Amino acid sequence: MKSGFVNIIGNPNVGKSTLMNVMVGERLSVITAKSQTTRHRIFGIVNGDDYQIVYSDTPGLIKPAYKLQEAMVKAARSALSDADILLYITDMMETIDKNQDILDLVQKSKVPLILIINKIDLSNQQEVENAVIRWQEIFPKAEIFPCSALFKFNTDNLFKRILELLPESPPYFDTDALTDRPERFFVTEIVRGAILENYQKEIPYSVEPVVEEFKESDDIIRIRVVIYVERDSQKGILIGHQGSSLKLVGTQARKDLETFFGKKIFIELFVKVAKDWRNRPDLLKSFGYEI
Ligand code: GDP
Ligand code: MG
């Protein structure tokens, strides 16, 4: 039996969550075009007859500007310390000098390192070859995989290589588990994803959805979510004229939840103000952040 932790790290927006979902084969992580979509570490588990791969997707490695971001960075850094295999993801657009302290940590790490150059669908062969040479100089020990997570290009080979590198070990989780996170967690992630796609500027970064009710019966799941915002003004924007904006969020979240759970969904959304929650340790803790 082979089992181990495969931790995915990299700067925001390079495609970490997209790749993790391809590797796990389920839509576990929220993916959108805005950066900092992923706030927590999420495990995605792939079970085979004689292996268990525990992927973890992390928030991007950003410089923290407020308490919430400190918790996000802590979660990302913890991924460096407990990995059996590290997947460092970059993409064809990223410039190399962005994050020297993280590069140093990755270079010093003793675990096998796979460097993924993602989004190669956006460039040509020559550019990809140049990028491989550039990155090989920075990480001489890394194995480099040019990939397109979006088009699942080269992800099969990546999977095979991960299996080869996986250490001998009994499984860490139930062999029928898909993730360590409860269903409620995915509800909040999906609602947050819908908010990210429907609002501009600071709104998506100021909300925290909390599931207050999750009742599953044979043919339907009834869900009630309270969306916390930092200020009254944000509450108004989130709800919109006569509730029109929040309605869009509800509709999209319902569709995404129906896809995720494979069941009919009834969802109610409420908005409440939790003043300045992103900087309040008590509230951050109650929302499940480790600070
Ligand atoms: P993360 O912040 O690193 O987790 O990045 P996401 O997985 O959320 O992806 C950020 C954006 O990049 C989304 O719009 C994705 O659709 C897009 N993306 C991810 N992988 C690829 C890829 O292989 N090719 C292209 N063109 N876009 C991608
Ligand atoms: Mg992400």
Image (spheres, grey):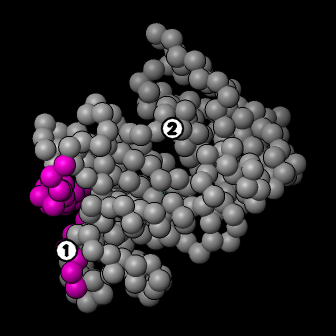
Of callouts 1 and 2, the N-terminal one: 1
Which residue occupies 26% across, 63% down? 85
In this rendering, is residue 191 above or below 63?
Answer: above
Picture coordinates of residue 194 (x, y %)? 59, 43
Q: Quadrant of residue 109?
A: bottom left
- Which residue in the structure is indicated by mark 2? 186
Residue 41, magenta (yes or no): no
Q: Residue at (50%, 19%) from the top-left corner?
A: 264
Q: Residue furthest top?
A: 218
Q: Is residue 141 magenta?
A: yes
Secondary structure category for the residue under label 1: strand
Residue 44 image point, x, y percent: 36, 45
Q: Quadrant of residue 205?
A: bottom right
Classify 195 as above or below 183. below
Q: 34 left or right of 4?
A: right
Q: Which residue is mark 1?
A: 143
Find the distance from the CA under tag 1 to the CA under tag 2: 33 Å
Q: Amino acid at mark 1?
A: Glu
Residue toward you, 278 or 231:
278
Give the residue at x 47% y 83%: 101
In magenta, the rendered stretch is 140-169
Frontmost residue, 94 versus 164: 164
Q: Quadrant of the C terminus?
A: bottom right
Residue 149 in view in this figure: no
Residue 188 sits in quarter? top right
Name the residue nearer the viewer: 177 or 260: 177
Residue furthest to the right: 232
- Residue at (62% x, 66% y) in the render: 70
At numbered mark 2, what does the secondary structure look like: helix, strand or loop?
helix
Amino acid at dot 2: Phe
Which quadrant would the N terminus be assigned to in this image?
top left
Percent across and percent down for residue 282 are: 75, 50
